[in-house]
Image: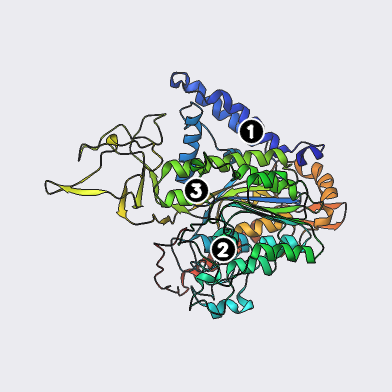
Amino acid sequence: MMGQQQPQKSAALVWVAVNLLLLVAAQQPELESQDRHHWWDLAQNELEAALNVRDNVNIAKNVILFLGDGMGITANTAGRIYKGQKKGMNGEEGYLTWERFPNAALLKTYNVDKQVPDSAATATAFLCGVKSNYYTLGVDSAVKYKDCNASLNTAHHLSSILQWAQEQGMDTGLVTTTRITHATPAALYAHTANRIWECDGNLKEEGAGCKDIADQLITENPGKNIKVIMGGGRRTLGAGLDPNPDNKICTRQDGRDLTQEWLKDKYHRGHTATYATTAEEMREVEKTDFFLGLFSDSHLPFMVERESNTSVPTLKEMTLKAIDLLKNPEGFFLLVEGGRIDHGLHGNSPYRFLEEILAMDDAVAAALEEVNLEDTLVLVTADHSHVLTINGYPDRGNDILGVTGYPSKEDGLNYTTLLFTSGPGFNYSIKNQTVTRLDPNDHDTRDLDYKSLAAVPRKSETHGGEDVAIWAAGPMAHLLHRTHEQHYVAHVMAHAAAVGPSAHKRLRKGYPAQHEASQASFFSVPPRAAYPQGTSITGASKTQIYPSINPGLQQVIAAREQQILKELGLMPVHRSEEIIYEDYEY
């Protein structure tokens, strides 16, 4: 394992492990034992752990970004409770793996033209470092929705963290439970005015002259240089295997099989390449220069729908295979997306989205066993939230998929703990000239197809506009420490790995010596006194940690920040045309 190749244990990893051990005693279902001493000791343990955290200023040899699509704070909390309850605990006292990372922050998710965002523009932000317009991918805000001509202007194209990593010799990969041409992964490599243009069959008149997303992935940089690609989406690449395809999925009209073009390109360039369509084929791969695994014509099935489908690998399996194939002395960048969390939420289906969160939790936990946090930055975040709420006053340990236990005094009916403000779960009727709703006590709220009640009827539930969380461990994780703009994440990854906009600021080649030189000078002083504002490397073994900036300079920076905020507030906002997406499969 990669982590075993490093003789020195990661301070951050040890911190995480210690905290997890401390929590074992705390995660007991007996409420009677949780007296004042329990809570006091729990807080003191947490405090002691926090006081022993030290910032890691190494250069990140590897960067792994886990993206829970739509996994807002409410969904994350519900996932935490669900995880504990599946283990026989109350649930509230537990943690998802990433919640024990030493650093966390909040991210503002709005788009340039939208208060509530979509996955294309948010992915562009955290992967390319620039906010953009709703439904656009890999282009700046000069490109409006469906403006094909503007998107062809390369001056408006954005490069991503994946491209920056490739330029520094790092291997790159993407893993997703959605189509590999879907919004989040597509922001790594595509430039388009409409995220729906996944294949040429969706271009139609408005996209005439533009290249579809699948074509860009296979034939252009940086897509064609991605070493590992895993997910769904055979049909958008012209390689569908289902004899009865879903008409909602984009279908190629040019007759091309892009999977074969992908293989030919690699062979012509003198590389080995493997294309797999089943989990078994993926498991058999031990070594290859390039790997493409497409395990469904469209998205991968929800975890709860895979009982009889062993041909589809889990997110954990794909993540571990990707890490294994991306071993490179120069390091790697890997995006892992739990994309179907979002789809479960759009359908008002708690059982589905909660199981998808736990699948990502398994993947993160497994990845931490394979890497060393001294040289690997691991981030876990969401692109946007959803209009989900945990409501009522249910008792401690109450089934998160159940009812609150306390009927509304207004209509005498109980209600589920998890509710949505919009979506297909809307179900009201008029009885005796009074509007009434379904009684959840008459239904199995744990049924796979049960839809939690929604206040506003919609075929697909909408995203939410509140901030999302990001958790970080590894080199430069401390740069995520307050409320940030979402596009800041790309800049943090770049700075940690010394690529892209930070390639000239930090010498990537000096990584091993930098670690040795900085260990004593940095970790021997309290973290606040030694907060690094930058790192200057003038040789392979020389490192200087600059002190905190003086109050006067800090005041100037703060004033400039206020000026920027003022200017942003006065910017004219483009009102995009209404986007009809009810029939589009997210």
Given the image, on which type of amino acid does mark 2 rest?
A: Thr
Query: Which of the two discs, 1 and 3, labels the residue nearer the N terminus?
Result: 1
Q: Quadrant of the N terminus?
A: top right
Query: Which of the two discs, 2 and 1, labels the residue nearer the N terminus?
Result: 1
Dot label at residue 293: none
Query: Which of the two discs, 2 and 3, labels the residue nearer the N terminus?
Result: 2
Against 235, residue 385 (above or below) is: above
Rounded to the nearest angstrom, the CA distance separating label 1 from label 3 is 32 Å
Q: Quadrant of residue 484?
A: bottom right
- Looking at the image, which residue is at 80% across and 37% down? 8
Question: Residue 131: percent from the left, percent from the top?
Answer: 55, 66
Question: Residue 138: percent from the left, percent from the top?
Answer: 59, 68
Q: Which residue position holds label 2?
A: 236
Q: Which residue position holds label 3?
A: 341
Given the image, on which type of amino acid does mark 3 rest?
A: Ile
Residue, far front: 243
Dot label at residue 49: 1
- Looking at the image, which residue is at 88% across and 54% down? 540
Residue 585 visible (yes or no): yes
Rounded to the nearest angstrom, the CA distance separating label 2 from label 3 is 21 Å
Viewer-side residue, 562 vs 219: 219
Viewer-side residue, 296 vs 489: 296
Question: Residue 432: percent from the left, percent from the top?
Answer: 11, 46
Q: Secondary structure at mark 2?
A: helix
